[in-house]
Image (tube, rainbow, N blue to C red):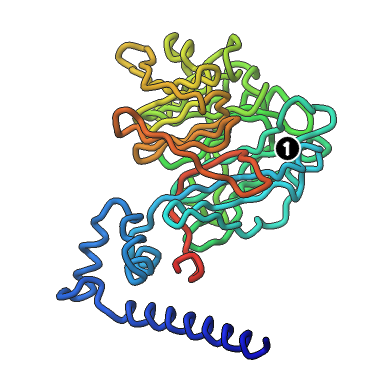
Amino acid sequence: MATTTTTTTAAKRHKLLHHHQEEEDEEQQPLIPGLPDHIAQICLSSINNPSLLFRVCHSWRHLIYSPSFPPFLSLYAILSSHSSHSGDGGDSVQFHNFDPISQTWQTLPPPPSYSPLLLRHPSFLSRNLSIQSISLAGSLILLAATTYNLSPALSRPFIFNPLSRCWSLGPPLPTPRRWCALGSSRGAVYVASGFGSIFSGDVARSLQKWELAAASGGDEWEKKAELKHGRFSREAIDAVGWRGKFCMVNVKGDAAKEGAVYDVEEDAWKEMPEGMLSGWRGPVAAMAEEEMYVVDEVKGAVRRYLPEEDSWEEVFECERLKGAEQLVAEKGKLCVVSAAGISVVDITVAPPRVWVVELPDGFEAVAVHILPRMPVTDSVKA
């Protein structure tokens, strides 16, 4: 029996060593026979779908994760464990990255020390408390959340850079807040309304701007034109950057709501067009700040806004998108967080194609963002 076991172990070891030798031999070969590697890399970098390269050979697989290869886009998600429904919050909230090429999840390094972020509270069992984040300039920015004592959890932005895999801190907020309107336009972050530990009319009417591109230790938030009232502090709001403006409504879903549009150049608030407001029936996002889309949370319908007609044109409808809670748009793709999980919609093809991103066991999605992929370990590349 011992001899058989020893023989089997030796055979497995020999097979493993043979596999590694094949990989080493393959990596020593040119990327494309007959071409210098630097020319081959230019050719391979022009392929828009890196997943095609991933499937061919190990040398190409290593190439697409190298610093010299154009970084492809991947998903960054705030996930909560199912235990968060008990109201414990805190460690139940984690930050993850999904690599669409290798179809694997990685856990991000934890942010610097901060107060626990609460998703559920015994006093509000029927709803989630918001954790507000945004993606801008290739980074993930965490800006507002709630602690167990219902106070703002963050006194300043937390910024995650995928390429360095590190968190940094933005400038302190003039007033840390929660349930605010958060958006971006033309490289700047905007925070409007909301309230701190207690309600303040000044905070509820306020608008603050932060130029992320100029981020440094001495930068500050800039005060901008105030809202005419504080009725936009009722819940967490996405302020959607669109054509030099950002647009927002004060209530989600099909309820009666009020809309507002901020003109970045004029530093002025204006009324939202009637057609835009009436069709705002779920999460909204803008592709490259040009094309605005909404997902009707009741019908699961994706619609595109037509500014010339002040109306919403239906693109398609999908059962899986019902109960949509968040929407992001990038490079012809819509990423939707709904009751069914995370769905990606390719709207560049007809009919649009939908596929599902499987979540790690025991977790559900709170929010997602689309950013360049992180550098990965050899275990993922293999």
Question: Tag 1's secondary structure?
Answer: loop
From the image, which quarter does the C terminus lie in?
Answer: bottom left
Q: Quadrant of residue 117?
A: top right
Q: Look at 35% across and 41% down and name the residue there.
A: 331
Numbered disc total = 1
**Farthest-out residue, front:** 1
From the image, which quarter does the N terminus lie in?
Answer: bottom right
Residue 213 in sight: no
**Farthest-out residue, bottom:** 3
Q: Quadrant of residue 222?
A: top right
Q: Look at 34% across and 77% down and name the residue there.
A: 27
Q: Position of residue 164 (x, y in %)?
A: 50, 63
Q: Look at 59% across and 57% down and name the residue there.
A: 108
Most foreground residue, 55 or 188:
55
Left/right of residue 209 with respect to residue 316 in the rendered view: right
Q: Position of residue 66 (x, y in %)?
A: 38, 68
Which residue corresponds to mark 1?
119
Q: Position of residue 292 (x, y in %)?
A: 39, 26
Amino acid of disc 1? Leu
